[in-house]
Amino acid sequence: MIYHGSKNPKKSMLGIKFPSLESPLYIKLGGRRARDLYKHIILTLDNLGIPYSTEKGSFHEALRVPWAAGLAITTFLLAVYSKRKPLAYAHFLDKMLTGGMPLSRHLTNMTEIALDLSEYLGNVKGRPLITHKSAAVISKMMINLLNALHL
């Protein structure tokens, strides 16, 4: 996970690179949401005792997490991609990381669907693998599903 902070929170960026930091961005969120989500993810990992390592630069941080935690974080970021207030769904990240999320196997498959949709719609080289349009569509589907679970 990559986080680029800024003195101006509107210019912050949070992204996932998988499987290594040299890989292209998988998904990217920006603005205040990125800062708030990054802080929440760090807090959640600390609270649950999930190990991670951090590499800090001048305005960026790279976070290395275990594979399963990375998949849960990626799925969560995709789900809240289209939400103005993504922390309203923060409890879903906790449930995914602790294994208490119903249908989690199917929710993680949504990242593959988003990737396939991005390829179908035409992905531009140098952009995140999951395009904005694809992420917005899949995010809305996931939020509808999460709301139906009444968790």
Image (cartoon, rainbow, N blue to C red):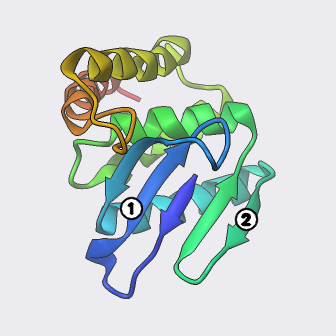
Amino acid type, mark 1? Ala
Residue at left 54%, top 40%? 73
Give the residue pinned by disc 1: 34
Q: Position of residue 56 (x, y in %)?
A: 67, 74
Q: CA distance from mark 2 to mark 1?
A: 17 Å
Q: Earlier in the sequence, mark 2 or mark 1?
A: 1
Residue at left 75%, top 40%? 66
Q: Residues within 10 Å of mark 1 (few under 14, many from 20)?
A: many
Amino acid type, mark 2? Thr
Q: Quick one: SS at disc 2?
A: strand
Q: Quick one: SS at disc 1?
A: helix
Q: Position of residue 139 (x, y in %)?
A: 28, 31
Q: Are marks 2 and 1 in contact (CB under 8 Å)?
A: no
Quadrant of the frame with the C terminus: top left
Which residue appears farthest toward the front when viewing the image? 125
In the displayed structure, 91 sits above or below 71; it is below
Quadrant housing residue 63: bottom right
> Looking at this view, is 87 or 4 the one in front?
4
Quadrant housing residue 31: bottom left
- Numbered label tally: 2
Residue at left 58%, top 41%? 23
In the displayed structure, 66 sits above or below 51; it is above
> Looking at this view, is 31 or 51 the one in front?
31
Give the residue pinned by disc 2: 54
Q: Position of residue 6 (x, y in %)?
A: 40, 81
Residue 49 shown left or right of residue 62 in the figure:
right
Q: Residues within 10 Å of mark 2 (few under 14, many from 20)?
A: few
| Residue 111 in sight from this viewpoint | yes
| Residue 148 in sight from this viewpoint | no
> Looking at this view, is 52 or 119 the one in front?
119
